[in-house]
Image (cartoon, rainbow, N blue to C red):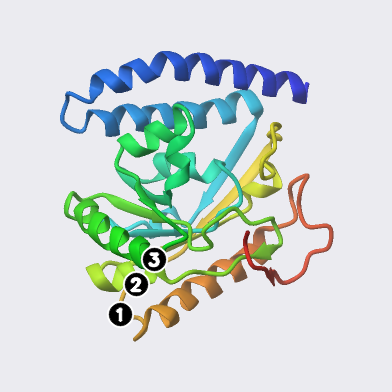
Amino acid sequence: MLLLRNLIYWLFLCIFSLVWIFVVIVSMVLPNGVTWTTTFWGKTLFWMLKHIIGLKYEVIGQENIPKESGIICCKHQSGWETLAMLDFFPDVAFVAKKELFMIPIFGWALKWRGTIGIDRSNPRSANQQIFKQGKICHDKGMWICIFPEGTRIKPGYRGHYKKGAARLAQHLHINLIPIALNSGEFWPKDSFLKYPGKITVVIGKPVSYDAAATPEELIRICEEWIEDTQFDIQGVGPFAPVKLQEPTPIIPH
């Protein structure tokens, strides 16, 4: 049944994406057309994960989302949260490695909707790009989603929290919204199979850009909250840590 569900999901995903890509192309002539059509594409995949795979979720702390846009500072364990952010927040711009733009359909959609693509091998250029594009997105009223660990991290572990999100928050004078989740316990990294169950998402209270004097101190506040919350919600999925313990720092590849 698990394999059948996944085969049906991938079949629908491929058919829908191949058809919808033409809608996205046509929408490029309309103001904000690409944003709307790519968001609809992401939400449709999100719906399919829930109703075909059986990958449900609960959100704790949704009342902590402020009316004004800010920077989403989210734990990254799987591809699920990329789709989830499109559903939880209006008009989201992602910060991602530019290599993702080379992925057919998915990468194209990311680029066309205004994703801030960065070169991780050139930190100075990446910071300049985040500042420049981040201001444009903020001026449009968009949310900016940054995965501070920079890559997907195995459940029960933590990566190195980079200070880009905190630096941008202090530069633009906007708040950070920390988010913890356990999606990797149901959707392992690079896995064809997604597993049914219920993901827990916890949205923390906004962290003010002036809560700390430096970006290093500010991102540390978010890191401590996220990792403490991770410890509380882990251990429920088929790929949960074998032994529950405080997340151990690792250096992401």
Marks 2 and 1 close (CB-CB < 8 Å): no
Give amino acid for label 3. Answer: Ala
Q: Position of residue 21 (x, y in %)?
A: 38, 20
Residue at 47% of width from left, 16% of height from top?
Answer: 16
Name the residue type under label 2: Arg
Earlier residue among tags 1 and 3: 3
Mark seen at residue 180: none
In front: label 1 or label 3: 3
Q: In the picture provided, is 57 more to the left or to the right than 179?
A: right
Real-space Cα distance between discs 1 and 3?
13 Å
Q: Nearer the viewer, mark 2 or mark 1?
A: 2
- Sequence-wise, the earlier of marks 2 and 1 is 2
Residue 108 seen in render: yes
Q: Which residue is mark 1?
A: 210
Count of all numbered marks drawn on residues in the image? 3
Residue 207, given in percent of the width and then of the height, sits at: 38, 71
Residue denoted by label 2:
167
Q: Are marks 3 and 2 in contact (CB under 8 Å)?
A: yes
Left or right: residue 137 versus residue 46 is: left
